[in-house]
Image: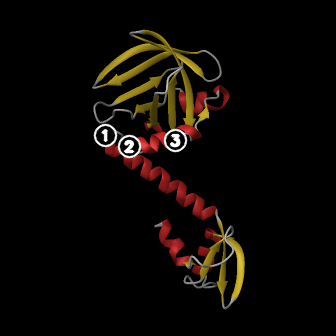
């Protein structure tokens, strides 16, 4: 899992108040996934600058506030710390303490149907998330197909599936990605269909 998290850091988007505050930040249940195998912690940023941290059925109430566009401060037992906020997609919040290489990764459990209580739950979350993303990419991507020695396309996978369903195209026809020049990968429409299941 550490490799997945390290891979996320270079692709983070800075927190933007106008874009993220109402819909992706405030009143969302953020599960801290760093160290979830030891204890589950849930952060809830309230609109009145109250931060509720729930860990092992104990709730700690503290304060938070915006400093500027993507910096927030959080009051801890050790004093106030300055944190830079980032997003990865709509459901991952990443906090980084100023002048530190340590990142805290959170999953928005309010937007996820299954509970996230263990490391295995986090791994399943990433599997579900990236399978869904891959499926969307494949479905929207375009392909050429060859039938009876003639090339047709490009078509999205959705369009190809419709043609197969209507028996206008054989599911065993070879396809090539729009970015490829030939059919050397010997990929068929039916192979793409299997990737969606």
Label whose residue precedes the other's in the sequence (3 or 1)? 3
Q: Nearer the viewer, mark 3 or mark 1?
A: 3
Is the residue marked by circle 3 packed among few (<14), some (14-19), or many (20+) residues within 10 Å?
A: some
Using the numbered discs, state the Cα–Cα distance from disc 3 to disc 2 in whole angstroms.
14 Å
In this view, 118 is above or below 137 = above
Residue 166: percent from left, percent from top? 61, 82
Q: Quadrant of the N terminus?
A: top left
Q: Residue at x 59, y 28 (%)?
A: 22
Quadrant in which residue 174 is drawn: bottom right
Labels 3, 2: front one: 3
Residue 20: where, in percent of width, then height? 61, 31
Q: How is the image coloured?
A: secondary structure
In the rendered image, residue 178, in percent from the top left (x then y), is placed at: 69, 69
Q: Which residue is mark 3?
A: 8
For numbered disc 3, what is the local secondary structure? helix
The part of the image, by quadrant, that contains residue 84 is top right
Q: Which label number is shown at residue 122? A: 2
């Amino acid at each position: 899992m550490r490799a997945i998290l390290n891979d996320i850091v270079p692709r983070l988007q800075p927190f933007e108040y106008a874009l993220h505050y109402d819909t992706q930040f405030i009143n969302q249940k953020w599960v801290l996934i760093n160290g979830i195998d030891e204890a589950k912690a849930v952060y809830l940023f309230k609109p009145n600058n109250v931060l509720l941290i729930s860990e092992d059925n104990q709730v700690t109430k503290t304060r938070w506030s915006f400093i500027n566009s993507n910096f927030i401060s959080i009051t801890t037992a050790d004093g106030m710390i300055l944190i830079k906020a980032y997003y990865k997609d709509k459901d991952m919040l990443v906090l980084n303490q100023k002048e530190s290489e340590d990142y805290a990764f959170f999953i928005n459990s309010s937007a996820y149907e299954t509970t996230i209580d263990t490391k295995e739950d986090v791994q399943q979350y990433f599997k579900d998330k990236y399978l869904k993303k891959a499926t969307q990419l494949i479905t929207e991507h375009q392909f050429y197909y060859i039938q009876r020695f003639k090339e047709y396309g490009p078509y999205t996978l959705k369009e190809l599936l419709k043609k197969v369903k209507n028996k206008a195209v054989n599911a065993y026809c070879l396809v090539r990605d729009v970015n490829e020049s030939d059919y050397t990968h010997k990929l068929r429409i039916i192979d793409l269909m299997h990737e969606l299941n």
